[in-house]
Amino acid sequence: MRTIRLVMVGFGNVGKAFVNLLHNKHALLSDQYGVKIQITGIATNRHGYAIDPGGIDPLKIDPVTKRSGDYSLLNKGPTVNTTMEFIDVCQGDILLENTPVNQKTGQPAINHLRHALERGMHVITANKGPVVHGYEVLTNLARNQGRCFRFESSVMDGAPIFSLFQSCLPASQLIGFHGILNSCTNLLLSRMESGDTLEASVKYAQAVGITETDPSADIDGWDAAIKVAALSTVLLGVALTPSQVDRQGIRGVTPEMISAAKAEGKRWKLVCSARKKGRNVSARVAPECVNSDSTLYSVNGTSSYIQFETDTLPGLGILESNPGPGTTAYGLLSDLITILEVWKE
């Protein structure tokens, strides 16, 4: 039985869901892959740092947080004051990076991942920033180090978007895609269709924990734009940043517009699209009024949908219904298993 040391940078709702999922799947990981996953480090800006070479008991994490809010009470290793120091001394085999996204630069997540790769760790992230702003650097560094850089959860949570093209569609060239990639705005528009104002819809979305840290990232289309940029960068092979995506959010969608569309049997959706033309990509995020015969029409609440167009398959769609921290955690687990499958050491 091989012990894999996992260290976590960022430990919010997704991180906690991942630990629970890891606990539930420990027998499967042992039986099918011959490994025991041991969490030996947690790093957070708000709650401090904990390193334990013998493994941190997941059942002790929440009680410590609720009682004191200080993860350092679980520390049995060197005392550190920064995340970079943590990466230097944690001695992990795999680093899972799940800090808040930085739409503009991808930092500090890029530096966290780069530092870990340089120290011989495989890296996994659910953070869109490094995929958009650091994809080439991190991919090349991982290859040179003989390590993996995985990021399945960065778009559509646990749905197999990136791995679909990496593993399941050989000799198929992606031409373009369209869909609903921001579950928050989809929920907001659904609530508005039921009679809520945008402001009331935002308060509800915040209450159920579906918004980005800054709700304007959802409302103004930035979260959707960075997802389009990530898909273009990785799948279409044309690097884009969110500012290069033709972007329009949902602030201009009024109750009157929604009522008029409803009367005509239509719905407003924030639609993401991109299409490759030669060496360029035309990418867009904007509200669209869709007909009832559109696939997008029935994608409601927090569900997401993407449809790909390839040279071999003209329409291949993936629907993810009502995702949450648990589905994002599954994407992280799938990346972990992929690493286990290719890791020969």
Image (tube, helix red, strand yellow):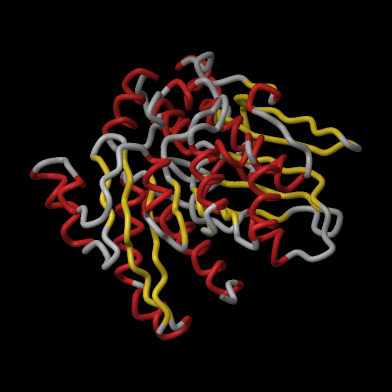
Q: Is residue 332 left or right of residue 272?
A: left
- Residue at left 44%, top 53%? 96
Q: Is residue 312 above or below residue 47?
A: below
Q: Is residue 241 left or right of residue 312?
A: left
Please state which of residues 229 and 176 is positioned toward the viewer in this rendering.
Answer: 229
Position in image of residue 135 (x %, y %): 66, 43
- Residue at left 83%, top 54%? 173
Q: Quadrant of the C terminus?
A: bottom right
Please state which of residues 209 and 108 is positioned toward the viewer in this rendering.
Answer: 108
What is the quadrant of residue 22 in the picture? bottom left
What is the quadrant of residue 244 in the picture? top right
Q: Quadrant of the N terminus?
A: bottom left
Q: Is residue 93 above or below residue 230?
A: below
Position in image of residue 224 (x %, y %): 57, 32
Outermost residue, left side? 67
Position in image of residue 25 (x %, y %): 36, 73
- Residue at left 69%, top 66%? 167
Q: Is residue 217 left or right of residue 17?
A: right
Please state which of residues 173 and 15 is positioned toward the viewer in this rendering.
Answer: 15
Outermost residue, right side? 278
Position in image of residue 152 (x %, y %): 56, 54
Please state which of residues 262 and 68 is positioned toward the viewer in this rendering.
Answer: 68
Count the numbered circles shown.
Answer: 0
